[in-house]
Image (cartoon, helix red, strand yellow):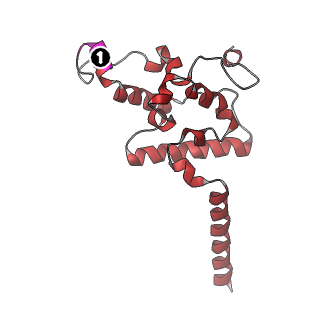
Amino acid sequence: MVKFAVALGVILLLLVAGVGLYVTDFTAYLGNDPSTCNNCHVMDSAYEGWYHAPHKLWATCSDCHTPHDLIPKYIVKAESGYHHVSAFTLGAIPLAIRAKPASKEIVQENCIRCHKDTVEDMLGGSYAESQPLERYCFECHRTVAHGERGISLLPYQQKEIDK
């Protein structure tokens, strides 16, 4: 009888998990479609900014915000998904979404990966041989990927949050 109860519990748990994955269209989050990132309303301003910014022509969310190697990419996606689900479940959604230090490093690596020739020209030699950059690329080029700060479809402006 105990084996039956355990088996039934496992089957029900798998069924609930399967239904949950189906209802949330889980497989969409494994891809690179930016509209998937915009499924959460808190991403509206980031998505809208990207949609109207120059990088839309060349890069999606994953191109900048995840590593490009297969396993690290999906580890980052899993960690991000866990944090997003936790925030929504517990109601701990920040007013302003800010990149964590590890995310900033990933974005910086991707800036340099795509713009390696420009970075090497700017530093006067091979990036690997030159001095490390003192600032993140996006500190000066913030508007390239997501447009001007403060432009938002949300009822509050970015500049109000930074005060």
Give the quarter of the figure containing the C terminus.
top right
Q: Is residue 46 above or below residue 83?
A: above
Using the rendered view, name the quadrant where residue 52 is placed.
top right
The residue that appears at 42% across and 39% down in the rendered structure is: 67
Q: Give how far across and how far down residue 140 sits, in percent.
A: 47, 13
State left or right for residue 41 relative to residue 36. right
In the image shown, does 94 or 31 lie closer to the viewer? 31
Q: Can I make out residue 134 in this image?
A: yes
Q: Residue furthest bottom?
A: 1
Q: Can I make out residue 136 in this image?
A: no
For the magenta stretch, what is the residue range? 118-125
State left or right for residue 117 relative to residue 33. left
Q: Secondary structure at mark 1?
A: loop
According to the picture, the residue beneath numbered tag 1 turns out to be: 131
Using the rendered view, name the quadrant where residue 150 is placed.
top right
State left or right for residue 131 relative to residue 62. left
